[in-house]
Every structure is written in C-alpha cells, then in structure tokens.
Image (cartoon, rainbow, N blue to C red):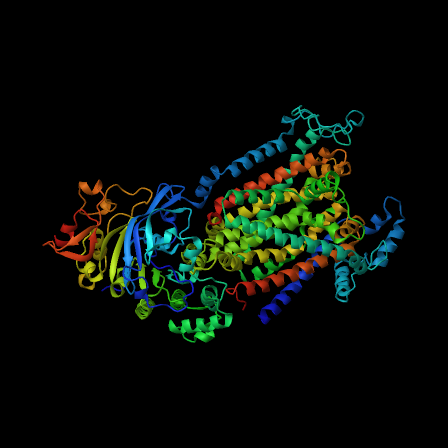
Amino acid sequence: MGRYVARRLLQMIPVFIGSTLLVFLMMYALPGDPVRALAGEQHVDPAQIAQIKADLGLDQPIWQQYLQYLGNLFQGDLGTQIGTKRPVADVIADAYPITVRLAIFAFIFTVVAGISLGIVAGLKAESLRDRSLLGLTLVLISMPSFVLGFLVQHLFAFQLGIAKPNVSLEPTNSELIMPAIVLASLSLAYVARLTRTSVAENIRADYMRTAVAKGLPRRRVIGVHLMRNSLIPVVTFLGTDIGALMGGAIVTEGIFNIKGVGQLVFEALGKREGATVVGIVTLLVIVYLVCSLLVDLLYAVLDPRIRYA
Amino acid sequence: MPDTTALTKSTDVPAEAQTPAATDAGPAPGKPRSLWSDAWHDLRRNPLFLISMVLILLLAVMAIFPGLFTSASPRDANLAEHYLQHPKWGNFFAPDWLGYDVQGRSIYARVVYGARASITVGVVVTIAVTLTGLVIGMLAGYFGGWLDTILSRITDVFFGVPFIVGAMVILTTFEERSVWVVILSMAFLGWTSIARVARGSVITIKQADYVVAAKALGASTTRILTRHILPNAIAPVIVVATIALGGYIAAEATLSFLGIGLAEPTVSWGIDVSTAKDQLRNAPYVLVIPSVMVSITVLSFLMFGDAVRNALDPKMR
Amino acid sequence: MTTIDKTAHVPAPRESVSGDGPLLDVRDLHVEFHTRDGVAKAVNGVNYTVSAGETLAVLGESGSGKSVTAQTIMGILDMPPGKITQGEILFRGQDMLKMSNEERRKVRGRKIAMIFQDALSSLNPVLSVGYQLGEMFRVHQGMSRKDAKAKSIELMDQVKIPAAAARISDYPHQFSGGMRQRIMIAMALALEPDLIIADEPTTALDVTVQAQVMDLLAELQREYNMGLILITHDLGVVADVADKIAVMYAGRIVETAPVGELYSRPAHPYTKGLLDSIPRLDQKGQELYAIKGLPPNLTRIPAGCAFSPRCPKAQDICRTDVPPLAPVTEQDGLELVGRGSACHFWKETIHG
C-alpha cells in the first residue's frame, strides 16, 4: 500500500507539470495581448507597450517564461497581477473561501439527495417510481446550470419572494443554499443514476439471495449487504466530482453574482491576466489530483478485491 | 458408481438459479442475433428512443433548412414596432408567435435559426472527439508498454484541466469566435473520456480468445485492430459519445451565455439567454424560450444516448 | 402442532418436537413465472417429504424446476416474476406459505438453511468471512461481536478450514473454491438448523474437492441428525449420500425411489435415459447414449407427458394424457415402498 501511494504521488508530478504547462501555453502562446487588453480602447505608444512587456518578462521565449513560472510556483509565488499589482496568491486567497463553501454545500447536497434518490429508484427498478425518477434526472442533466439558475432565481426570488436573487458581498450560509442546489443539480442527477444502476444490478446478485436465506432482516440485507457493494462506484464518482463542482462554480457564481474564484477567473480572462488564470487552474488541477488519489485509496479500502502491487 | 456425469449434454453448469425464462426466453430459438441487430430490435420498441429520434430529426431539419419553419429573419430588428412585444400564443409559427426580444427580433425566428449552431457544434465536436479518443485509446490499450504510459499520462493531463475553464481560456484568445473556433476548443479538451473508455475496452478484448486466435493464425496488427478489436470495442465508445453529445450542446450554450462562446452575428440560444437575463423580471419568456430549446435539444440527445446504452448493454436492464 | 420456538438457542432433540410426521412436506406445489414471453410454468404439482436425518436427492436438468422448488421452500423466490399459484409447504406441520414475512424470516437460517452452488458469488465479496459467519449469531441470537467471532472460528474449525483463527478476517476471494464452499456450509450450519437445502453444492468444484465437500456435508448431517435436500444434476454425487431420489422433469416429479432401487431398476424412460448416458468403463469404445432433443420450453410445455417428444417409447396416449405419479409394484403386485413413476408404461419400463 505504501509503495502504491508513493508510485501514485510520483505519477502525479508529470501530470501536474503537464496540466499547468498546457494552461500556460493556451494562455500565453495563443494570440491575444495582456498589455493591450490593459490599455483597452485607448491608443498607447508601442514603445511603452514593449517596455511594460520587458518589465513583466513577457518578451522572453515561452519556455523560459514557463520555467520561470514553475520555479516561482514551487516557492509559493504565483506571480503578480498586471492591473492591480497585487500578488496573485492574495487575490486567489480572497476569492477561494466562498467557492469552497459553495462547493462543499453542493457536494453535501449531491451526496444526500443523489444517493437517496438512487436507492429509492434502484430498489424497485423498472417500476413507475424508478422511471419517473430516471426521467427527472434526465431533465436535470439536460438543463445547463444557467438555465436552471435563472429558473430557480425566477421562481424563488421573483415569484415567491422567499430568497434574494443575488447574494450579498459576504454571503451567509443560507444565502448560498440556492446557488449550491443549482451547482449540485448536474452531479446530483449523475449520482442518482449511478446509484440506481449499481443498486439495481447488485440487488440481483447471488450474495443478496444468500443474505435473505440467512434470515437477516430486510434493513440489514439492504443497509449492509447491498449498500456496501453498491456504493463503491458511487464513491469513486463523487471523488472525481469535487473537481467538477469547483469548475462548475464559475457559471453558478456568475448567475448569483458571487465574488468567488469563478468570477475571478472570468474577470482575469477578460483582462488577460495570465498569472491569475494559470494560478486558479493550477489550484483546480491540484484539487483534482488529490481527490483522485484519495478515491483510489478509498477504493482499496471499500473493495478488498482490489489490491495494489 | 460413476464419479461425475453431466446430466445434460448441452451445458455443464445449469443456469437454473435464475428464472427459467432467462434460459428459455428469446423468440425464435436457434436464430443467432448479433449485439447490433439485438440492439436494433430493442430500440425499435423503446418509446424513449422513438420520441428522441423524432425530436432529433426535427432539430436536424431545423438546422439545415430553417426557412421551412419561418419566413421571418432572425436578424431583422425593429425596435420601434416590436420592442418586447409579448407572445401571441395563438399565432402558431408566425413571427410574433413567441413574441419579440429587446431588439425587436422575432424570438420564434431566432429559436429556429439557433438550432444550426447548437447541432453543428454538438455533432462535429462529438465526431472529432470520438475519432481522436478512439485512435489514442486503441493505440494505448493495444500496444501497452511505454506507449500506453505516455498516452495515458497525456490523457491525464488533458483530463485534469477543467473543461469549461479550459475552453474559456482558449476561446478568449480568439478575436473572431466562429462556430469552428468553438468546435476546435471543445474538441481539443474533450477527447479524454472517450480515450479512457476505448483503452479499457481494448485491454479487455485484447485478451479474448478470438483475438489470441487471430494472432496465432498470423493476422497482421492492422487487421487485428480493424477487424477484431474495433468492432468489439466500439459499443461502449458509442454509448459514451452519444451521451456526451448532449453535454457538448449544453457546453456550447453555456460558453455562449458567458459571452466567451459564439458571438453575434451567429444566432445562438446561449447568446439569446444571456441578452435576455436583464429582462427576467418583466419579460421572462425572452429568456425562458431559448432556455427551453437548449434543454429540449440536450434532452433529446440524452434520451437517445440512454436508449442506445440500454440496447447495447443488456446488463443494465 | 408446535409453533416455532423463538428463544431456543440450543437445538432441542429433534424427534420429540413435533412427534411423528416428516420435517418438511411439500404438497402439490405450483410456481409460475410471468415473463415478457408468456407464463413459464416452472413447478407443476410437486410433492415430496423429508424427515429428520434423511437425505432426499432431487435430480433434474436445468429448467426442471428443482431449484425453483428449493427457492420456494426457502422463501427466496423473486416475486414477481415468480408466483406461487397452488400448494402447501408444511414445515413441522405448519404451512410456511401462510406465515407472515417476519415469521418466515425467523425460520430462514435458523430452522432451514441453504447452501448455494457458486460460493464465490454467493458470499458477499466486500465483507470478511468472519463477519458473514458472525452475522448469523449476532442477528439471530443477539451475540456480541466478540462472542460471534469466537463462534465463527469454531465453525470454521468444524468444517475443517486450516488455520481458522488466522483466516477469519480474510475475504471470500482469498479462499480456494473448496474452502469457500466449506464456508458456505459453515454458514448454513451455524444455528444448527433442522433442514439444509443444498443446491448443486459441488457443481462448481474440482472432482477431487467435490468428494471431500460431499463427505463433509454427509458427516455433519449425520452428526446433527438434520434433514437434507440435495439438488443436483449429477447422478454420481447422489449415489453415495442420498436415501431417496426424486427425478424432476419440466416441473414435475417423474419418478421417486430409494437410491439403490432407482439405479438398478428405473421405472421411467427419462431416468433410464439418464442412467444410460453415464459413460461406463465396461462399455468402452461404444457410442455413448444421449437423450435426444432438448428440455421443453416452460412457456409451452407439450400436452400429455412432457417427456413424450423425447421418449423412445412414446405412444398416442402419452401425447394426450398426463400420466399421474403411480405407485410402482413388483410384477406380482407387491408394493415397492417409496417408489412411484409418472409414466403410462412404467410396468414395461421396469419389468419389460
């Protein structure tokens, strides 16, 4: 097990470097000019632009810029914003907590509602109850979050008046519930479908028949024997989904006007603040890598048939 | 006394533990059916499939010949006469049927013309992603070794970058964001899940007896890959691809909504939702109608994918 | 009539509990499956009895209804699609089909236990064998985890699993096929039930292991004086262990007989066909006999005797009239105890 963890950690290094390089290249090698973007519509002297670029090191070859960036990164330096002159790390640190809160709420919602719906449907596969729940999840999946976001906003804020359409600058937990539901909806639907399939498949397994033949009460047959097996793929999915929730927060934050990482990335892209964008994506990549490692380890704990050499 | 004697001559392990129907069911015994003809047999009777098929055909016709559905132009703006004119629900298929948007353009016409961008992006991205993913996944899965290591790590790298954020980064660098730029940016990041599925499926099939037999008989690698591996590995890939198609349509709408996807003058439902959001209070239909179109389109492809999955993967039923 | 003793942790001496009469009495049992392709009549009027200490072997091909009957007795039939349309299952004189779910549950595992064919898939893959064995004691007898563990080790010793204490927290996939089947047996034996139903207990095993597992089962059965229903398609397994045999075909019992009698003098053409299809050393080189045709589709069981389309001796009457399970007698009319045959021409088959 220890060796496996070590190997996985080693494997993460090239993936981490690769992902950041990819984003770095996309940000800097493709056309588009951060300094010109800073100036906006005004006419600026080309010599002045060249001077700013030289100051920022943007005139160097792209690989040199990347090595420089990577070197700084390992010292905890994510660079400086061109526009505000603030360290990127500080800017991200300001915006991060609220996104994490939003993602955690959405995650809890996904787990609780997704798994319960999946179990309810899977226990009676092919029944009317199952089919309607499957239909509901399809509808949820087919609604992009901006559509669902406006729908929820319209319904709860404008029609019923029980919530505010936008959250305040320092949102309370209750203000975040509505955005969290919107953010969670897609994952929730996937988790429900996955749980449903897994439950419906395992319920027909031979060991389930054995459990009944042993004279165990139904809640034990379902709660221990069925669930212990059925939730293995769900846990795997949930792990990789944390990253997706953080990524999906961008759209949700836009709809509800939440000043989180999503808004930050959006603004930074508009101003072509490369360091900020790359910094945020790097963070998302780290979250994803750590989650997938945890999932793999958890998988071994949950399923004794998996053994890592 | 004999030690062991199989009672039946045909099978050695009785499958009676299941319902007898499992062994005796199936019409026309003795008539072999392939996975594909079996799937087709199931699909034809699946109402979900039929409904989604009709919707998809309708959307396809709408995308190719929008003029068949409306005589109005999606770009004709008449602020003076039509500013936020509410829908005339009785005037079916007339330009004012679904009302006018903030710029006085017929919402119905925009909804019809918006299909082209959505469907094009969805279909082309899916094809591109499937071909790329299939090639990479098959190479990695079949040859294994260092090639697999390299290709798998590259897949991990692309998989690690969040899809929407990645697409946003690419798209902001382009001044002119045509349909093709959007397709390119999405395909560039989207192939990973297909590659993973294809790789896994090839690894399983590689060990199958018929592939081992083909190798033993001296079949060339190309022949094994195209004649033996591909036809058997393709089913799960198709399932993932059809379901992903709906996702790409939703992603295009989302990017356009965020203002980083398609841009005017391209007609896109995502853009329409975005421009309508300030009017949500007094004219919700301007936002709701294109939103509903996006959802119906995505739903059609999802139902289609779902039906195909059920048909190709009988275990799921 | 006795009710089931819910508190008994120690098995009472079996003979005295309900006086005489068999332990299990299945009467005219009918089971159907409602499927897309129609109604499959899986069990069509099965009768059999098992007494304490007795072994009944139920023999038949796939789809003969032998496993469905067992699942119905056990109360683990999937309903729907399964449906019990007629019959009684008397356990110690009480009809189990009329019991509440809770009453049935308390019989399962405690009074009647079952051993399944494929131990690998029948044991829960993600729970340790110790947990799965201990569960019997914890759920049925409210034992603590610690006591249950000790009892589980004891059980594993009893079914001759080496180093039981060390292997208690291993998972099913870590055991060999034979060892896994021993664990299944241990689990069935845990609460010292009155009756054990073994559904093809050795089919999935190697030939050499088969014999060991069968011997163990027979030994434990004698030790605890349990009733045993042994379901199999393998004539070889039956011969050494069973007291009596019921041969099933298309959901009916076509022949019953004490074990020795059946082998020496079959009274049904189907049984005869089965015996003739056993490879024998003294007939080396000759073509092996095989019953022609396939078992019938249970949604369309042929009229008359279900075996008639495959029977070499079928006459017109066989295609119209269903033969009842008639008592089999010697040529002089002397009754042969425990023998019966559902063939219009049983006389010709046994004596001819």
Task: Kindly give the residue lying farthest to the left in the view shown.
Answer: C332
**Residue B5 seen in render:** no
From the viewer's side, name the closer residue of B236 and C303: C303
Q: Give x and y (percent) for residue B245.
A: 60, 43
**Residue C141, located in which quarter of the rendered image?**
bottom left
How far from the left and from the top, in percent, is residue C223?
32, 71
Give coordinates of residue C266: x percent, y percent.
19, 56
Compared to residue B129, the image places residue A284 above or below, namely below
A21 sits left or right of A47 in the view: left
Total marks placed: 0
* Residue C54 falls left or right of residue B309: left
Left or right, C298 with respect to C345, comes to: right
Q: Seen in the image, is A141 located left or right of residue A177?
A: left
Q: Nearer the viewer, residue A131 or B157?
A: A131
Near-viewer residue (C321 or B206) = C321
Question: x%, y% of residue B315?
Answer: 47, 50
Q: Residue at x 46, y 54 (%)?
A: B220
> Residue B37 lies in what quarter of the image?
top left
Q: Is residue C75 visible?
A: yes
Looking at the image, the residue that sits furthest to the front is C1
- Image quarter in which the N terminus of chain B is found: bottom left
